[in-house]
Image (tube, rainbow, N blue to C red):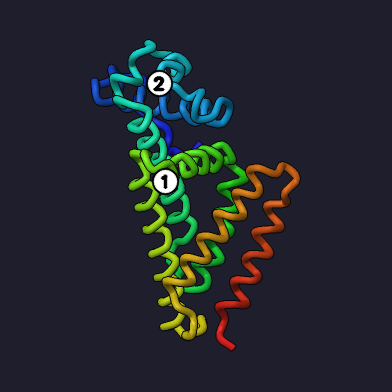
Amino acid sequence: MPQSLNHNGNTSQPRTQAERTATAETRMVLAAIDLLNTAGIQGTTLVAIGENAGYSRGLATHHFGSKSGLFTTVLKRLSSAWSKELTRKLGKNTGLKAITTAIDAHLAHALNHPEYIRTQNILWGAALDPSSEFKPNVAEFMRIQRESIALWVSTGQEQGEINKKIDPRRFAEQFYGGLIGINSQWLVSPEFDLATAYEDFKSSIVRLLRTK
């Protein structure tokens, strides 16, 4: 699991209250991810999370307040894990290289941690509910992703490697939508060839963006 989802304290020394709280949150977040993957939204109750994490039935309620509070935390932790992984793999790459690197990194993330991708998509779907309290968190994450993509395009245009007729913002919307669509098909269709879909997607993107 990405280290950002784990709490790595020094177990040889007595832990502070803050460390114990951080450990409890991590264990409950991981329990929630497991339940969402096996029991879905309805089966992911605060009571079940507390018990599956090895704590009292009421600790999750005490810690998160509500299912929405818990799901908000889960989304933040998953988003942070992906952002750190992407930043590490991008290095100093910009422009077209950043875009192709991001596609490869996203494929690797999906294959290495399908439970995270499934959890994220389950919660994104739940955010479509008009009463969802964590919809703003989903919208903000997606906005940040689109802005990063648009910046890669505009930087590539400045460097002369990406067609200047491409609208960075519009491209970012379609690019991100394409990745979400590919993952959605994979999650509901076991026979879906995710790796090939990503390679085809990357090839199409490169052809679209390159200067003529």
- Single out the residue that lies furthest toward the left: 17
Q: Nearer the viewer, residue 137 or 14?
A: 137
Q: Residues within 10 Å of mark 2 (few under 14, many from 20)?
A: many
> CA separation, marks 1 and 2?
21 Å
Q: Residues within 10 Å of mark 1 (few under 14, many from 20)?
A: some
Pointer 1 residue? 79
**Residue at horizontal 42 percent and vertical 58 percent from the top:** 145
Indicate the position of residue 178 as horizontal and vertical percent values: 57, 61
**Residue at horizontal 44 percent and vertical 74 percent from the top:** 168
Indicate the position of residue 94 as horizontal and vertical percent values: 45, 70
**Number of numbered discs:** 2
56 w.r.t. 71: above or below: above
Pointer 2 residue? 46
Query: In the visual, does 198 lie left or right of 177?
Result: right
**Residue at horizontal 46 percent and vertical 48 percent from the top:** 82
171 w.r.t. 177: above or below: below
Q: Earlier in the sequence, mark 1 or mark 2?
A: 2
* Mark 2: secondary structure: helix
Q: Which mark is residue 70?
A: none
* Mark 1: secondary structure: helix
- Single out the residue that lies furthest toward the top: 56
Q: Amino acid at mark 1?
A: Ser
Q: Nearer the viewer, residue 114 or 14?
A: 114
Q: Where the C terminus falls, by quadrant?
A: bottom right
- Single out the residue that lies furthest toward the right: 191
Indicate the position of residue 31 as horizontal and vertical percent values: 47, 25
